[in-house]
Image (spheres, rainbow, N blue to C red):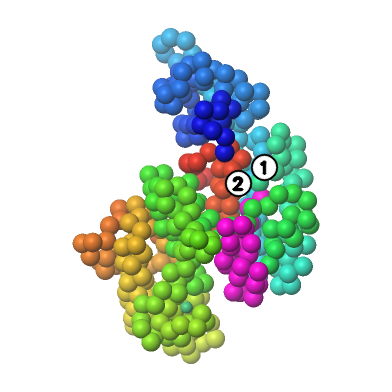
């Protein structure tokens, strides 16, 4: 970073502030931009000219304005480039292409026929090339490719461990960059989900916890707008926090881990056992809930209880404004939030809101697009509307 006295550095800071404000306000005049950013009219004027030259913003003259001159409004040229977000999950890869304001242009899930590493790289590279072609007629083309990985990612974007694939210390970033011929960002999926919640849903929450409960428990921790990652990048694995001493055995080698009690995979596994079936799904649970099935109600009670125990601990550690739970199971159980909150009664633990995610399965790819857009504009805070 240049010294704070460096004019180029100041100029970049101002540009970032102006872009962030235009995105937040959607459409804004130069005069209002000056007021909101506390930058002089002259600075706004020079910066706006640069942004127009760069085709990052466009001007619109308002048609109906009752008094005075019709102001010329600035807004983001949303199709100047496109962001690609990829959710690399076991069995399927999901690709989302968004414009520069996060609006999805396409959303496709490609089943993975082979779980072989080289085959996955090839499939991903072919798809990326297709989206690159689709974006090629715009000024900036594909501005970012961000891949969400369901495992441990180091601060240097090395993939340390992905349990479902059995991947250890693989060079996914380098291998994919070589195959696709462009720069790729690798990020943990829970982090991307929490970023999506922050960017698209919770504009007032600088400190947010996003917990994905589908397979195990993944936690994305956003503190003061940034991911909280720890020394190596591995922070946010509370699924392996012991909440029942000497409890159920876990694949990590310990007993009584939170995800053995508070994840959907554990719930479905146990429910299938109790029902004497190979597997059960969301529809089964929905039907059983309608029939007020005793086994399912007892299991939901237990799930809610253990989920609350872990959440109580997380809230005490992080004091978040918002906690978002991404869970299909909780989405079909309308009382979920109220029931969990009944258990969060400690007068020490503080949070403002607890929500079940509206973004659901799209959270990871939306977060991946958002991260790319944030990096492209070089802005610290991004607020977009989910459409
Ligand atoms: Zn464990």
Q: Is 294 placed left or right of 373 in the picture?
A: left
In this view, the residue farthest toward the left is 347
Q: Are marks 2 and 1 in contact (CB under 8 Å)?
A: yes
At a point 41% along the width and 11% down the height, the residue shown is 67
Comes first in the chain, label 2 or label 1: 1
At a point 54% along the width and 86% down the height, the residue shown is 278
At a point 46% along the width and 18% down the height, the residue shown is 40
Distance Cα–Cα, label 2 vs label 1: 7 Å
Was residue 166 drawn as part of the magenta stretch in this picture?
yes
Chain part drawn in magenta: 145-169
Numbered disc 2: secondary structure = helix
| Image spot of residue 90 (x, y percent) | 63, 70
Was residue 196 drawn as part of the magenta stretch in this picture?
no
Numbered disc 1: secondary structure = strand
- Seen in the picture, residue 45 relative to 141 is either above or below; the reply is above
- Seen in the picture, residue 238 relative to 350 is either above or below; the reply is below
| Image spot of residue 165 (x, y percent) | 65, 73
Residue 360 visible in the current orientation = no
Residue 112 visible in the current orientation = yes
Residue 372's label in the rendered image is 2
| Image spot of residue 25 (x, y percent) | 46, 31
In this view, the residue farthest toward the top is 68
**CB of residue at label 1: within 8 Å of ligand 1?**
no
Q: Which residue is mark 1?
A: 143
At a point 36% along the width and 64% down the height, the residue shown is 314
- Seen in the picture, residue 151 relative to 4 is either above or below; the reply is below
Quadrant in the rendering for residue 109: bottom right
- Seen in the picture, residue 18 relative to 118 is either above or below; the reply is above
């Amino acid at each position: 970073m240049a010294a704070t006295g460096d004019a180029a550095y100041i100029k970049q800071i101002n540009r970032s502030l102006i872009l962030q404000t235009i995105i937040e306000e959607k459409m804004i005049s130069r005069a209002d931009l000056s007021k909101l950013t506390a930058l002089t009219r002259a600075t706004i004027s020079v910066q706006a000219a640069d942004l127009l030259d760069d085709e990052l913003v466009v001007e619109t003259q308002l048609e109906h304005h009752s008094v005075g001159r019709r102001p010329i409004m600035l807004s983001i040229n949303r199709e100047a480039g496109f962001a690609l977000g990829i959710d690399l999950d076991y069995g399927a890869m999901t690709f989302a292409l968004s414009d520069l304001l996060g609006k999805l242009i396409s959303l496709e899930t490609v089943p993975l026929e082979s779980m072989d590493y080289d085959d996955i790289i090839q499939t991903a590279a072919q798809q990326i090339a297709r989206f690159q072609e689709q974006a090629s007629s715009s000024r900036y083309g594909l501005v970012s490719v961000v891949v969400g990985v369901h495992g441990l990612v180091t601060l240097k974007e090395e993939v340390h461990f992905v349990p479902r694939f059995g991947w250890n210390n693989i060079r996914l970033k380098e291998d994919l960059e070589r195959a696709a011929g462009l720069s790729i960002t690798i990020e943990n999926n829970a982090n991307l989900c929490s970023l999506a919640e922050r960017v698209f849903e919770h504009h007032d929450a600088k400190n947010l916890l996003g917990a994905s409960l589908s397979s195990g428990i993944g936690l994305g921790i956003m503190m003061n707008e940034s991911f909280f990652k720890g020394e190596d990048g591995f922070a946010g694995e509370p699924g392996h926090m012991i909440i029942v001493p000497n409890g159920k055995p876990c694949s990590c080698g310990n007993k009584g881990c939170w995800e053995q009690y508070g994840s959907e995979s554990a719930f479905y596994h146990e429910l299938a056992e109790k029902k004497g079936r190979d597997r059960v799904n969301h529809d089964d649970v929905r039907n059983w809930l309608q029939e007020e099935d005793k086994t399912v109600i007892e299991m939901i009670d237990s799930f809610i209880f253990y989920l609350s125990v872990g959440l109580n601990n997380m809230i005490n550690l992080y004091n978040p404004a918002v906690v978002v739970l991404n869970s299909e199971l909780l989405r079909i159980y309308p009382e979920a939030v109220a029931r969990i909150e009944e258990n969060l009664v400690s007068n020490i633990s503080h949070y403002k809101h607890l929500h079940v995610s509206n973004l659901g399965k799209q959270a990871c790819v939306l977060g991946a697009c958002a991260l790319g857009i944030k990096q492209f504009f070089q802005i610290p805070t991004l607020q977009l509307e989910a459409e």
